[in-house]
Image (tube, grey):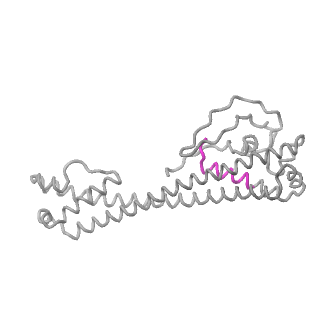
Amino acid sequence: MRFTNKFFASYLQIIGGIFEKIKIYLDFLAIIAGYGYNDARIQEGKAFYDELYSCHHLYLEKRQETLSRMKAADEMFKKVLAKHSNHVKRLRSELRNDLETKTLLGIRGSRDRSKRGFYDQANNFYNLAMKPENFVKVQGFGFTMEELSSTQQEIKSYYSFRIGYETMKGELQELVEKRFQAYVKLRDWMAGFITACKVAYAGKLQTLEKFGIFVLNRPRIHEEEEVPEEVPGVAAAPVAPATPSAPAASSAPAAPIAEENNAAQVTQVSPVSEPAN
């Protein structure tokens, strides 16, 4: 399955609702304490929820900052690429009969338009063009030392800005991993908690709905297990066997049903496309 932002938003809403509801039912807390979920154990689960909530929102903030920096870096790249390309274009024309100087300045052949390759190629061009012995060969074509130096500085500023963006991308991927690990801890805790609730309320499972724990009101039909999908960059979490949907007469929403039946995993959330990290 894909762990999208929509998935985590739905999952947090469901689990947060359960923790909010159970704390006002003292009789429920007294019963479930007899099955190993006393106040300390409940607070442990709430701490897992708070950790996932924090990781998720830190990721969302960092993602927006990274997207913003990416847009700015792309604009800077277009600007310096255009300036450098115009310099090369002019010199190719002016030096069309001077193969030695064209070769020296590296303006023959195609330009490297990759983000990293461009910097090395362009920076080398300006370093060579501003050497006194080489500058005299291009000075007569309207080039000034100030113009060449200024463009090179813009390219260096772009490169530094780009390095910062790539660092943010790495931090974003760290948050993806951290968020997933927080989810696994909460998911496993919820699996045990919901199982204890079902045992404690055997024969009257519908009572659990007031706590936000929804259950099927008909026997489960066992189906063939599906092959779990891999989560990029992390070990895939096991996926429980697929279960049939609740009858139309049930008022239980799809996501909580999936939560209870798949050991606290919200599997009914549809994947959505996200901008590339």
Q: Is residue 148 left or right of residue 34?
A: left
Which residue is drawn at the image coordinates 29% and 56% (left, top)? 120
Q: Position of residue 213 (x, y in %)?
A: 79, 47
Closer to the camera, 238 or 58? Answer: 238
Q: Does the magenta-highlighted stretch encompass residue 15?
A: yes
Farthest residue, direction left: 97
Closer to the camera, 86 or 221? Answer: 221
Residue 43, image quadrant = bottom right
Residue 277 in view, yes or no: yes
Q: Is residue 226 left or right of residue 140?
A: right
Q: Does the magenta-highlighted stretch encompass residue 137?
A: no
Q: Main secondary structure of the magenta part?
A: helix
Which residue is drawn at the image coordinates 52% and 53% (left, top)? 173
Q: Quadrant of the N terminus?
A: top right
Which residue is drawn at the image coordinates 30% and 54% (left, top)? 118
Farthest residue, direction top: 224
* Residue interval drawn in magenta: 1-16
Q: Position of residue 16 (x, y in %)?
A: 73, 55
Which residue is drawn at the image coordinates 72% and 29% (left, top)? 223
Residue 70 in view, yes or no: no
Residue 156, image quadrant = bottom left
Q: Position of residue 269 (x, y in %)?
A: 66, 44
Q: Position of residue 266 (x, y in %)?
A: 69, 45
In the displayed structure, would residue 4 be above or below residue 51? above
Number of numbered discs on residues: 0
